Amino acid sequence: MRQVMQSAVNFSEGKNQSVIDAIVSAARMRSPAVVADYSSDADHHRTVVTFLGEPQDIRSAVFASAKVAVESIDLRRHKGAHPRIGAVDVVPLVPIRGVTMDECVLLSREIAGDFADKLHVPVYLYEKSALALHRLKLPDIRSGGFEALAAGSLDGDRQPDMGPTTCHPMAGAVVIGARGPLVAYNIDLETEDMKVPQAIVRKIRSGEAGLTGVKSMAVHLKSRSRVQVSMNLTQPDETLVLPVFQFVEAEAEALGVSIAESEFIGLVSMRYLPVEPRETIKALRLKDTQILEYWL
């Protein structure tokens, strides 16, 4: 590939394997983009599919998979630990090789047009693609979740950037935008006591941990009988994975709890990882194909 762009598309389905398979298969059948990774979590009720490819190939992969999701996922029946406003919840675009951020912004608006015109889903543009200051941050757009959007007309601060001004009855809305690299990183703790991850998350959010750019939330993993500190490292060049692991480990141990394992969702560049990550940070299930450089 002359140009390489990455898109880790978040779908609000983590339980129905037939729907997940259909989403992935649609992208593979209708686009030359590579499905570099996909993973599902029943507790988060979410699947992340990571595409790598040239810009227009990414566009076709996103649309093919999104069409299946919009037709198959009903958020009125969706309950999961992860915040969401859409069946296709977030479509980030990241420049990897031979692509500028401006090109990612341009493509984000083309993809937004596909959602608005062909799928009839309201679109919010975020991060580098944002058209308004209150749309820069994803949590601000997702405030209140699908239920808040579905409760009335989308006007005022809820006015979409593209598409209909009413929430899609099943598929909600979608957030699309160009952004820099992000590491989706979770640490599972050997306890079901939610007070432990909540205490750790409070320190991360307050800045006490000194972990620049780390967004976190506490999650109960009922299917694994564990709790989790779920994180996005939004400035991974400043805050590497190892100090994040070490902080969570030290805080958990101070509360008498050990780490079961840590995991990455989607791809991660080796430059953000410690040597021997499977042993050093208990990333027991990290696959070679999850390392970005494997594909380049």
Image (cartoon, helix red, strand yellow):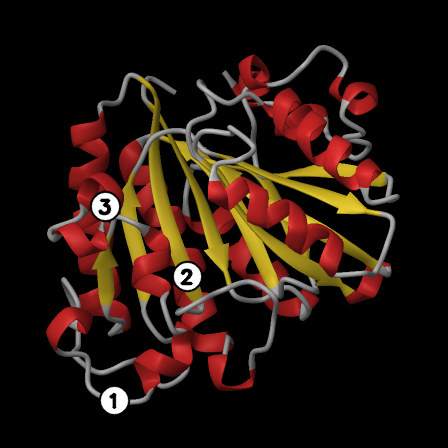
Mark sitting earlier along the chain (3/1): 3
**253 displayed left or right of 125:** right
User: Crowding near pointer 2: few (<14 within 10 Å), some, many (20+)?
Assistant: many
Q: Nearer the viewer, mark 3 or mark 1?
A: 1
Q: Amino acid at mark 1?
A: Gly
Q: Position of residue 251 (x, y in %)?
A: 73, 37
Can residue 274 be seen here? The reply is yes
Q: Amino acid at mark 3?
A: Ser
* Mark sitting on residue 89: 2
Q: Nearer the viewer, mark 1 or mark 2?
A: 1
Q: Nearer the viewer, mark 2 or mark 3?
A: 2
Which of the pair 141/88 is nearer the observer? 141
Determine which residue is flagged by label 3. 108
Determine which residue is flagged by label 1. 152
User: Crowding near pointer 3: few (<14 within 10 Å), some, many (20+)?
Assistant: many
User: Element type at marker 2?
Assistant: strand
Residue 214 to residue 12: above or below: above
User: Element type at marker 1?
Assistant: loop
C-alpha separation, residue under disc 3 versus residue under disc 1: 26 Å
